[in-house]
Image: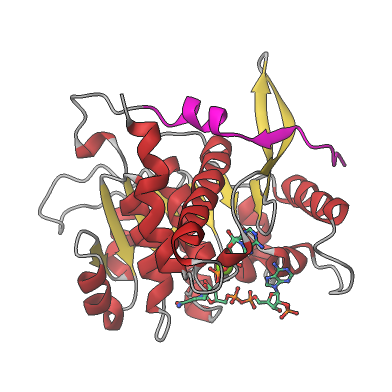
Amino acid sequence: MITNITGTITEEYVRRVIRPRPRDMHKGDCGHVLVIAGSAGMTGAAWLAAGACLRTGSGLVYVCTPKANFSVIQTLAPEAICIEWDEALRLLSGDNTNTGRHFSGYDAVAFGPGVGTGMQSKRRLKALLMTYGGPLVLDADGLNLIAGDDELKEMVRSYPGEIVMTPHAGEAVRLLQIRETGDWKETETRRRMASYLEETYGVTVVLKGAGTLVAGRETEDGVPRFVMYENTTGNPGMAAAGSGDVLTGVITSLAGQGIPVTDAAKTGVWIHGRAGDLAAADLGEYGMIAGDILRKLPAALKPFGER
Ligand SMILES: NC(=O)C1=CN([C@@H]2O[C@H](COP(=O)(O)OP(=O)(O)OC[C@H]3O[C@@H](n4cnc5c(N)ncnc54)[C@H](OP(=O)(O)O)[C@@H]3O)[C@@H](O)[C@H]2O)[C@@H](O)CC1
Ligand SMILES: Nc1ncnc2c1ncn2[C@@H]1O[C@H](COP(=O)(O)OP(=O)(O)O)[C@@H](O)[C@H]1O
Ligand SMILES: [Mg+2]
């Protein structure tokens, strides 16, 4: 197992990935994404993830969440389209007969924030992995479901498309099925966990926390090689409920805009941390909340869109 750091994620790198938009761009060019998130009492997770997709530049954002959450999400983010699971699945399988519009499929899908770990969520995750083959971001309860189900583990390993997993240390411990002892904040331990997760699941791994790590594969001279980068943005004010749900939306949006998932993950964590730093500069590390990180995404992204 390799635990060497390939490098840090820098502003110069982000500038190479996020380019000023072509003048003739239209919303079909910048990604149609689906966010499967939220449950009764967890509307916020769906709003934060979907709102982050909108604020990162997605052309069209669908939120699949229970109907009881629709009015809150439509009030906080009326730009998003709320749908229930049956419709999301129909669109995933390419059936657009009931949409009343041309729909060519999702460019990226997120699954997990606040969905719960019951049988219904498990069935939906299995259906998603079987039906969709595009870029997929798995977070929170999506990861908890995988940790507890061997069939899901195998489905992730054999998924035909690209996957990003975004565990915090607690979720990483569950995914690796290690005993919950040890100092999960220790640098070498975190590097080992990120590397082992990448190797075990064959996905891009975002191990969140202070100095978020991104482990994945990059192709050099036609040969894929293991890489691991450490993020340089972010602050302890981000240790607040829902901060990770915002990150899920940012990475999903970037992947939906055609950025390969390891680059979407690296760029996403940098932008998310930068938005957190801007929120802390305005409000301080104690008072800032996840919604403030979401609201600072435009300012974090603005310099990269300027011609
Ligand atoms: N408003 C909404 O709708 C919101 C909805 N949300 C949704 O709620 C769901 C549950 O998500 P969650 O992350 O709160 O619960 P969970 O995975 O049990 O994590 C806690 C456990 O993990 C551990 N642990 C955590 N971080 C760690 C670290 N860095 N380093 C080390 N350990 C760490 C921690 O251990 P402890 O420190 O307590 O011993 C504890 O055992 C999820 O679907 C999410 O999307 C939330 O986003 C909130 C806002
Ligand atoms: N001390 C810290 N320094 C930098 N970033 C942090 C710190 N604590 C938390 N974060 C960031 O905040 C986010 C928390 O995500 P997560 O634990 O999934 O929260 P939630 O599930 O409540 O949304 C991650 O992106 C993590 O990197
Ligand atoms: Mg989380």
User: Which quadrant does ligand 3 occupy?
Assistant: bottom right
Give the left or right position of residue 40, taking residue 112 as reference. Answer: left
Residue 180 location (% of width, % of height) = 84, 74
| Quadrant where the image shows the C terminus | top left
Q: Nearer the viewer, residue 146 or 185?
A: 185
The total number of labels drawn is 0
> Looking at the image, which residue is at 66% across and 16% down?
222
The answer to whether residue 113 shows anywhere in this view is: yes
- Residue 14 sits above or below residue 220 on the image: below
Give the left or right position of residue 244, taking residue 306 as reference. Answer: right
The image quarter containing residue 100 is bottom left
Residue 267 location (% of width, % of height) = 53, 40
Which residue occupies the extreme bottom position in the image?
41
| Quadrant where the image shows the N terminus | top right
Magenta span includes 6: yes
Give the left or right position of residue 173, taking residue 22 as reference. Answer: right
The image quarter containing residue 203 is top right
- Residue 231 sits above or below residue 87 on the image: above
> Looking at the image, which residue is at 12% across and 49% down?
101
Which residue occupies the extreme top position in the image?
221
Q: Which residues are magenta?
A: 1-19
> Looking at the image, which residue is at 72% across and 70% down?
170
The answer to whether residue 112 shows anywhere in this view is: no
> Looking at the image, which residue is at 30% across and 68% down?
86
Residue 10 location (% of width, % of height) = 60, 34
- Residue 36 sits above or below residue 8 on the image: below
Magenta span includes 222: no
Give the left or right position of residue 183, taking residue 304 as reference. Answer: right
